[in-house]
Image (cartoon, helix red, strand yellow):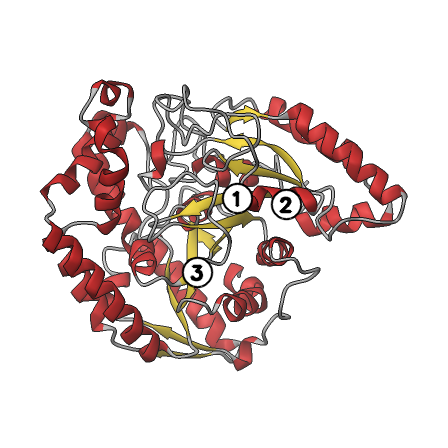
Amino acid sequence: MAPLTASDISVGLRSGKLDPVTVTEQVFDRLAAHGDDAIYIDTLRDRAMTEAQASRLRYRAGLPASPLDGVPVAWKDLFDLKGRVTTAGAVVTKTDPAATTDAPVVATAHRAGMISTGTVNMTEFAYSGIGLNPHYGTPRNIHAPAGQARSPGGSSSACGVVVSAGIVPLSMGSDTGGSVRIPAAFNGVVGYKTSFGRYPMEGVYPLARSLDTIGPLAHTVTDCALFDAVLRGKDAPETPSADPATLNFVIPDDVLLGDLAPAVAVNFDATVSRLQDAGSRIRRISLPELSELSDLIAQHGVLAGAEALALHRDRISGAAAQQMDARVVRRIKLAERMSAVDVLLLQQARTRTKASTARAIGTAIVLCPTTPTTAMETAPLEADQDEFFRANALTLRNTSLGNFLDWCGVSIPNGTDADGMPTGFLLSAPTGQDTALLAAAMGCEDIIRG
């Protein structure tokens, strides 16, 4: 049977066909049956069952706290949950003080009656699009052919896996360069990257504060939109699904369409054709800023790297570096080559191109593949750091440009390759247009999925 969506569970709870305590117990039963110890860093069964019991009482009284009361959720292990140490996928953080309160976004979900099942695995310090973790293991991509281990995507690796495997219907990740949308694409689920500042970021372990965003992964766009609404204090998505025939899409120049794996290209073109057949207007446009930004980043460095270096400089220059993922240390150290002028030029370019691309796009939705490839085998990346860095850069290319421009985005599965690995179709919009983007994604989801 297909796993239940958050909306399915909500309907079942409200009708009395489902019970919050049973739903929560089944999460841990499914996790045990699945047998992948690399998914959760910390399961919180006692907390979850206490929350489920409270949810059961509210339903019996006819007073659910929200449409997602009693629905289980998993949190990427960079969200503070009261009483536990937030690891951010590292072991050097284990001696940090335990969180004294939930992160505000976790607290909002708790007040809405959602069931926090625990914290899930991630790339150390959220700094990779591949999802490998030498400390807690790499979560298993369930779509991999027999005998293979494929990337779960990063950095919110287990956020994608835990939903794809049907263990929970919702997870919350973070996205600084693609870390929600990439795991969504690689695991065949939906991922929603919010505009900067849509949710409070207090109590969320940072990577690059000027770029960090958070967002949900789920089975459907509707579930993401409902979670978004609940976190914003609403009982329903802020707008209904949009009619595809009323939508205006643009496909930028070839920066986002270069070096595509054959199946990614074929599935992207087929999806575009289906949208056109449904009456959507789709135009090819030039966005020279994308090439300019690619060149600037190649010349001056990665803005997120400079911010990560400022945060972790003492760690990577001391004994703690020996306890860290060598790939993460190497990537952070790349920013040591950057000067203050490099950072300033990147910041200035970001301000300018955010404005110019927003003017060029207007109210249209930008279309591109979420990632240029499907999930790759992990063994070659574990064996060769240079190969890892090449694959990581390509994997992050499309999504990270969106982060630099502060585009919100929704990745929706749109097919598979010959090995059965999912491909992702990315809809993006300029910052602040989240509500319109979600409406478009909800309206087009079935078409995109084919």
Please give left or right for residue 362 compared with residue 287 in the image. right
Mark 2 or 1, nearer chain start: 2
Mark 1 or 3, nearer chain start: 1
**Tag 1 near tag 3, CB within 8 Å:** no
Q: 266 and 409: which one is in front?
A: 409
Residue 157, image x, y percentages: 43, 37
Three-letter amino acid code at disc 3?
Answer: Ser
**Tag 2 near tag 3, CB within 8 Å:** no
Three-letter amino acid code at disc 2?
Answer: Ala
Return the residue at label 2: 109
- What's the residue at 67%, 28% (across, down)? 47
Neighbor class of circle 1 (other Cα within 10 Å; few <14, some 14-19, many 20+) is many
Q: Is mark 1 on a helix, strand or loop?
A: strand
Q: Is mark 3 on a helix, strand or loop?
A: loop
Check residue 172 in the rendering and tell me which mark sits there, or answer none.
1
Of tags 2 and 1, the one toward the viewer is 2
**Tag 2 near tag 1, CB within 8 Å:** yes
Please give left or right for residue 232 compared with residue 402 in the image. right
Neighbor class of circle 3 (other Cα within 10 Å; few <14, some 14-19, many 20+) is many
Real-space Cα separation, disc 2 to disc 1, in angstroms: 11 Å
Return the residue at label 3: 195
Residue 154, image x, y percentages: 38, 40
- What's the residue at 53%, 37% (across, down)? 75
Q: 4 and 128: which one is in front?
A: 128
Real-space Cα separation, disc 1 to disc 3, in angstroms: 15 Å
